[in-house]
Image (cartoon, helix red, strand yellow):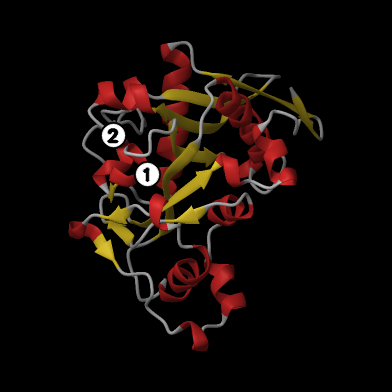
């Protein structure tokens, strides 16, 4: 349990249909209402953002202890569950062959979001602490998942995409590649002329946080018109985290 001002938070995995619907409702508010996304199984009447993968994921939620309101969500899919689901969610956008052939324990992260009132504070760290415990419990080696820039105007995103390609491209053995139908090259601007500071300002805070943890990106972005986003695939090898960063994934950062 973590305190933020007068608010206390708790992290847990969804256990009931009511909890799952609360998570899907927050996802609707963020990904559909706020960001303009959609999908075949989105329930606009009930305001639920959902898809065919939901039954296979573990859903981690962050709640306020005074009223149990769900104010944060993470979706977690382990390799064994992905086999049952017919693949990882990210395989709709990226060729994950190199990760799947690695023989290492994989965990896909997705649908990470927070209620607007709790962004920029301790809430995300609370979710990450819960994720750290999950990673340790399941002996996860590789974390990955798609993360998004809002909008599909790739010319407007040329600077941050070029920066990610130049400074944070994954090593060959982890370098997943965007599928051809949505592929957008990321090295759009000559890095010699790139204003790196201005480019980094355009990178969403969640992506920057993953990069600070030692994350890297796959080859190419994926333009997702259904969700009105331009996605990159983030990959983190837990063995490569430095000592300070590793505390987050050892359950010590409380």
Position of the C terminus by quadrant = top right
Element under label 1? Answer: helix
From the viewer's perspective, is residue 200 above or below residue 24?
below
Position of the N terminus by quadrant = top right
Mark 2 or 1, nearer chain start? 1
Residue 66 position in % (x across, y down):
71, 19
Residue receiving disc 2: 42
Mark 2–mark 1 Cα distance, whole angstroms, equals 9 Å
Residue receiving disc 1: 32
Element under label 2? Answer: loop
| Picture mark count | 2
Q: Is residue 31 left or right of residue 90?
A: right
Q: Please tell me which residue lies in front, 7 or 73.
A: 73
Asked if the residue under mark 1 is in contact with the one under mark 2, i.e. CB atoms within 8 Å, the reply is: yes
Q: Which mark, residue 149?
A: none
Residue 113 position in % (x across, y down):
51, 40
Quadrant of the rendered image containing residue 28: top left
From the viewer's perspective, is residue 220 above or below residue 196?
above
């Amino acid at each position: 349990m973590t305190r933020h001002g007068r608010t206390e938070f708790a992290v847990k995995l969804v256990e009931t249909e009511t909890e799952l619907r609360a998570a899907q409702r927050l996802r609707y508010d963020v990904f559909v209402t706020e960001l303009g996304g959609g999908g075949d199984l989105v329930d606009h009447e009930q305001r639920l953002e959902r898809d065919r993968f939901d039954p296979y994921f573990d859903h981690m939620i962050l709640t306020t202890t005074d009223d149990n309101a769900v104010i944060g969500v993470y979706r977690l899919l382990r390799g064994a569950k992905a086999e049952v689901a017919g693949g990882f969610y990210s395989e709709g956008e990226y060729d994950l062959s190199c990760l799947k052939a690695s023989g290492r324990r994989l965990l896909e992260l997705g649908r990470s979001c927070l209620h607007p009132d709790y962004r920029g504070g301790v809430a995300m760290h609370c979710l990450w602490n819960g994720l750290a415990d999950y990673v340790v419990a399941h002996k996860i080696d590789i974390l990955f998942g798609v993360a998004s820039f809002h909008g599909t105007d790739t010319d407007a995103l040329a600077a941050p995409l070029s920066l990610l390609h130049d400074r944070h491209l994954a090593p060959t053995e982890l370098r997943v590649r965007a599928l051809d139908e949505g592929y957008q090259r990321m090295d759009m601007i000559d890095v010699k002329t790139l204003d790196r500071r201005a480019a980094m300002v355009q990178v969403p805070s969640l992506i920057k946080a993953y990069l600070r943890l030692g994350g890297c990106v796959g080859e190419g972005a994926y333009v997702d018109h259904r969700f009105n986003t331009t996605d990159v695939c983030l990959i983190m090898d837990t063995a490569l985290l430095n000592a300070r960063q590793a505390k987050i994934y050892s359950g010590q950062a409380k």
